[in-house]
Image (cartoon, rainbow, N blue to C red):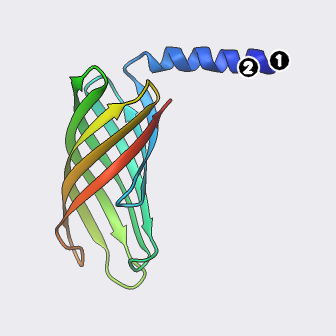
Amino acid sequence: MKKIIISSLLALSSLYASTAERAHIGIAHDTNSIHLGYDIDTALRVEGYFAYDEDFDKRIDLGVGGFYKTAATENSLFYVGARLGVVDFSTLDGGLLFTPTAGYEYMFNEHVSFGAEAGLAVGTGDLPTQTVTNLTLRYYF
């Protein structure tokens, strides 16, 4: 019975992965964030994110981003877009954060990718404008 279930899940995941529409989960190193994304088609991605930083006044970020993707090589892609988020602190005033972002992603196989991205985070309230860089690791379903 276990073999049938595992075989069925593998078959379904390979069919799902071969389409343009794919979901993924990822982590970003420098911002300590978790990304949940969905590739709408081969060129568009929507991605929500959550970040928590206990060392920086218990900062909590919650937001969404939209990106245009284009193939760089057979196993890699470039993406450009922006994230819009809400930031809250335990003692400081939070605000909105708008972050135009560009990135590169290399696919090791059809499920795992590693990438790097950079952006300019423009904030309101007590949030300063600053550059943001991340190393990303994503798993595609």
Circle 2 sits in a helix, a strand or a loop, which is it?
Answer: helix
Q: Residue at x 60, y 14 (%)?
A: 11
Q: Amino acid at mark 1?
A: Met
Report x, y in % for residue 107.
Answer: 37, 29
Q: Amino acid at mark 2?
A: Ile
Which is more toward the observer, 129 or 87?
Answer: 129
Structural distance between the alpha carbons of marks 1 and 2: 6 Å
Residue 104 pos. (x, y %) = 25, 38
Side of 38 relative to 105 (left or right)? right
Label drawn at residue 5:
2
Asked if the residue under mark 2 is in contact with the one under mark 1, i.e. CB atoms within 8 Å, the reply is yes
Which quadrant would residue 137 be assigned to in this image? top left
Indicate whether 141 appears above or below 127. above
Q: Nearer the viewer, residue 87 or 3?
A: 3
Residue 8: % across, % down:
67, 15
Q: Position of residue 6 (x, y in %)?
A: 70, 21
Return the residue nearer the eye: 127 or 140. Answer: 140
For disc 1, the marked residue is: 1
